Image: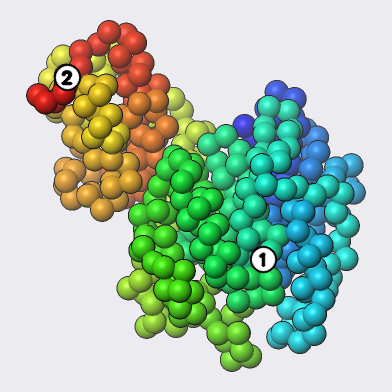
Amino acid sequence: MIFKHFNFEGCLSYILACPAGRKGVIIDPSHEIQPYIDFVTANGIDILYVIDTHTHVDHISLSPELARLFGAKTVMNTLAPAQREIGATVTELFGIEKIIAENATKPVDLYLDENDSLSAGSIILKVLHTPGHTKDSMCLLADDRIFTGDTLIIGQCGRTDLPGGNPQDMYDSLFEKLAPLSNDLIVYPAHDYRGNINSSLGYEKINNVCLKTLRTVEEFTMFLKGLFPPLDAGGGKLQCGLSMGDTTPSVGDDQLNPLMKSFCISMEHYLRAPHEATLVRTGELLERVKQKENIVILDVREPRELAELGFIAGAINIPVKEVAERISELPKDLDHPIVVICESGIRSAHAAIYLRGYGYTNVKNLEFGIREWRNNGYPLIFPDNSP
């Protein structure tokens, strides 16, 4: 996949394209038009769709302008007209009413609903309707990635007190639509003001202030009231990805626990790195095990998977969702060699990135995972109580 992310003052947008046919899409473009043109031109991409994940209230969408330049179609959720009707009732809200009014004039060529999909060459984007920030908010699933707009933001969710927002809708979107999805999904939001590039859904389930605590809808609603900066002239911070922790350091820091910039999961950097720097093949690992090298084998599967499918002798088992909180169980020497494994190599890739972000310098992922190891007939052991 050809992939590029853009960051304009905390507003994030993306280009995805199929490497074979060079067909692509743009998601949530804003601020400056030239960087998109430069990347598309340099990579010979044929942009088919320009997508807004929702009606933006804090910046002007560039979707129609880019669509016109590239001969593409603009795309939004099917409830965008209803969201625009709500926006039309806002006559004074500290300047954002002008942004709302201008975005309401942007033409839309194609509306998408729940479970609809778009294709750009080999890339398929599936729609999840996720209201809460706005009525027309949607997330886009693309292979191992999810583009969450202002529904799920790294460390929190989007604010629900702007026109079209609703905390109960946000609760349903987070816990009924997103929480059941795979922990392995790489999360790309529409905003981040802390220097993060992306996250993973598994990490967010454990660490995100809006997801990690089990709350009723009523408790969740009350929590959100204390999370976002107030909608008053003195607040001065109405951006969709900001919280009280960003504006008043003494309030909410113990709850927010945001990802450190050096700890974010830079998966695109991982994918660009040379093979030998990030991966170890099963045959090579077997030889290192036979030679009794002093390496840590970290198996990030769930315990039931080890019981059912077997594991490599001497491996440490820490499920991927627990790696961050159990980091103390790994060697204190950050240069110690570590090989991370899972069933297919996807979860372990995320864990390897976590460890690199933490400071471990000699971390590799087992290519194709324990499945390849098993298919090659390499030795596995089972817990004593397994059949």
**Which is closer to the viewer, label 2 or label 1?**
2
View extreme (top): residue: 377
Count residues near mark 2 (Cα–Cα under 10 Å), then give few for <14, some for 14-19, many for 20+.
few
Q: Could you tell me which residue is drawn at 54 percent across and 68 percent down?
A: 168
* Type of the residue with mark 1: Thr
Mark 2 vs mark 1, CA separation in Å:
51 Å
Q: Is residue 179 above or below residue 272?
A: below
Quadrant occupied by the C terminus: top left
- In percent of width and height, residue 176 lies at 50, 53
Residue under the image location 32 percent in, 21 percent down:
370
Task: Answer with left or right where residue 301 lies relative to residue 134.
Answer: left
| Label drawn at residue 387 | 2
Front one among 39 and 326: 326
- Residue 349 falls left or right of residue 322: right
Seen in the image, is 136 located left or right of residue 267?
A: right
Residue 184 vertical placement versus 162 (above, below) = above
Callout 2 secondary element: loop
Q: Residue type at mark 2? A: Pro
The image's colouring method is rainbow
Seen at 32% across and 73% down, the residue is 254
Going from the N terminus, do you reach mark 2 or mark 1 first?
A: 1
State the mark number for residue 134: 1
